[in-house]
Image: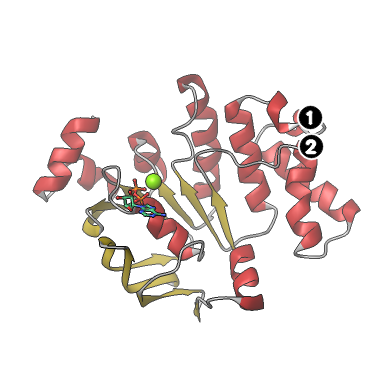
Amino acid sequence: MDPLVVIDKVNKHYGDLHVLKDISTTVGRGEVVVVIGPSGSGKSTLCRAINRLETIDSGTITIDGKTLPEEGRGLAKLRADVGMVFQSFNLFAHKSVLENVTLGPRRVRGVSKADADKRAMELLDRVGVANQAKKMPSQLSGGQQQRVAIARSLAMNPKLILLDEPTSALDPEMINEVLDVMITLAHDGMTMVVVTHEMGFARKAANRVLFMADGEIVEQADPEQFFTNPQSPRAKDFLSKIL
Ligand code: ADP
Ligand code: MG
């Protein structure tokens, strides 16, 4: 495996609460890792630590050979290399769909308007919303907005995309349109860390499932093995509740 993200003995506290306990794992280039586990187990904190939206108390996180800097230009560069898609779409409400996708490349990467527009239209087409480019985010359905959010993160040509429960705020009929885009990305070789309980996605697209509970990685396995034959009592208990 060619490691893209190396997480080594990471610890994080919020006051007395130990939210990440000696977390170590590696994400290979092109690998798709699904993170699953009960609410409050530290999944979002781990995602946020990977792109330094959250500081860590000890341990190291290395992305493409570079240990995460605390601040400065290195940090901006790193954030640009790591796309992030949240549960609540987080589009810029006062910018059109097209502007949402072109803003990062123009401001951070210095791409010309013409080039940024062209690439944005290709990406919007890829996620199936090219015909919505001129609209404002509020005029789109939740599923469409989340696909725009994915196109926006792709526009920065990230090395890795983190998706934190990207479908959990969506109405059921919109979940598959977002999962289908994610599956295509995975098959195209994008490196992805996805927090989700969507077993269908994990089975179709994930190389590995990482089960977290109480701030620890309790179990790592391939999806088929994890869902059909979990090893730890906590994973068995969790799966019995969601399946
Ligand atoms: P998950 O995404 O698995 O539901 P989180 O990473 O969001 O879990 O949270 C892990 C724990 O840390 C939870 O107990 C949560 O309440 C707590 N927590 C998360 N963010 C903060 C914060 N900014 N301040 C204090 N506690 C927090
Ligand atoms: Mg979370």
Q: Residue at x 82, y 32 (%)?
A: 134
- Residue 152 visible from this viewpoint: yes
Task: From the top left corner, tell me how far across and down residue 20 is, in percent.
Answer: 29, 63
Q: Residue at x 44, y 68 (%)?
A: 55
Which residue extends farthest top? 173
Q: Please state which amino acid type lies under the numbered disc 1.
A: Lys
- Give whichever of discs 1 and 2 has the lower sequence position: 2
Q: Please state which amino acid type lies under the numbered disc 2.
A: Ser
Q: Residue at x 49, y 41 (%)?
A: 183
Query: Is 32 placed left or right of 135 in the picture?
Result: left
Query: Is 164 placed left or right of 89 in the picture?
Result: left
Other-residue count near label 1 (Cα within 10 Å), few / some / many at <14 / 14–19 / ≥20 = some
Q: How is the image coloured?
A: secondary structure
Confirm if mark 1 falls within 8 A of ligand 2. no
Other-residue count near label 2 (Cα within 10 Å), few / some / many at <14 / 14–19 / ≥20 = some
Question: 126 or 109: nearer the eye?
Answer: 109
**Quarter of the image containing the N terminus?**
bottom left
Disc on res. 135: 1
Residue at the spot of label 2:
96
Task: From the top left corner, tell me how far across and down residue 131 is, in percent.
Answer: 77, 28
- Under circle 1, the secondary element is loop
Disc on res. 207: none
Query: Is 41 placed left or right of 161 in the picture?
Result: left
Q: Residue at x 84, y 48 (%)?
A: 118
- The quadrant holding residue 229 is top left
Task: From the top left corner, tell me how far across and down residue 87 is, in percent.
Answer: 49, 40
Q: Are marks 1 and 2 in contact (CB under 8 Å)?
A: yes
Q: Distance of mark 1 from mark 2, alpha carbons?
A: 5 Å
Query: Is 74 placed left or right of 65 in the picture?
Result: right
- Residue 34 visible from this viewpoint: no
Question: 138 or 84: nearer the eye?
Answer: 138
